[in-house]
Amino acid sequence: MTDTARSRSDLWTVTTADVTSPEAEALLREYYYDVANRYYRLHLGREGTPEQLEAGLADSPSDDLAAPSGLFLLGRFDGAAQSCAGLRRHDATTVELTRVFVRPGLRGTGGGARLLAAVDEAARGMGAERIVLDTRLDLVEARALYLRHGYREIPAYNSGPYSEVWYGKDLTPAA
């Protein structure tokens, strides 16, 4: 990592947040629009319409990313909310990672690494021994991020309509 990238990564902080806060809702909308439009462009050769995007967002609630079933993390770059991730209880020892997003203009500044370090800590705090997630094959940046941070491909644990590859990570106890 260059000195410039290192100094930029120092501007990131991650804390738990209310998933219904205006900052969280804005990031979740931006996340959904980003992944949905990538899907529309890849499979239909066009952007989603505002009606399609809003309908999809409404069909993909994030209310389970709050206690007691989960939690929501908000990443701030130089004080401004710029990234997010959610965890939801999957079973007694496993949590599912979802809604991982770093605003495109700040990708490559260390925000994803900070976010995933906070995810590990939060998952341990929930009593988890393992984190799982599903994603699409076209989300190459996210897949590379997961692999860099200890996730490995695992067998499918769900049959979501957009699930194409599944990852898992065993958590080691906190130092």
Image (cartoon, helix red, strand yellow):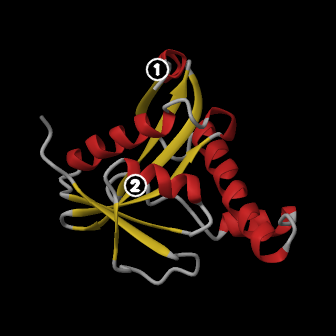
Q: Please, which residue is most extreme toward the front here?
A: 2
Regarding mark 2 in the picture, which secondary structure is present there? Answer: helix
Residue type indicated by callout 2 = Leu
* Relative vertical location of residue 20 with respect to residue 36 in this rendering, above or below: above
* Relative vertical location of residue 142 with respect to residue 92 in this rendering, above or below: above
Q: Relative to 29, is 81 on the left or the right?
A: left
Q: Residue at x 55, y 19 (%)?
A: 79
Q: Residue at x 35, y 47 (%)?
A: 149
Where residue 92 sits, quadrant-wise, is bottom left
- Which numbered dot is residue 6? 1
* Alpha-carbon span between mark 2 and mark 1: 20 Å
Pinpoint residue 114: horizontal percent, then vertical percent: 41, 34
Q: In what quadrant of the picture does the C terminus appear? A: top left
Q: Residues within 10 Å of mark 2 (few under 14, many from 20)?
A: some
Pinpoint residue 163: horizontal percent, then vertical percent: 52, 76
Label 2 belongs to which residue? 147
Q: Is residue 158 visible?
A: yes
Residue closest to the eye, 11 or 137: 137
Q: Residues within 10 Å of mark 1 (few under 14, many from 20)?
A: few
Pinpoint residue 9: horizontal percent, then vertical percent: 48, 24
Residue type indicated by callout 1 = Arg
Query: Which comes sooner in the sequence, label 2 or label 1?
Result: 1
Q: In what quadrant of the picture does the N terminus appear? A: top left
| Marks 2 and 1 close (CB-CB < 8 Å) | no
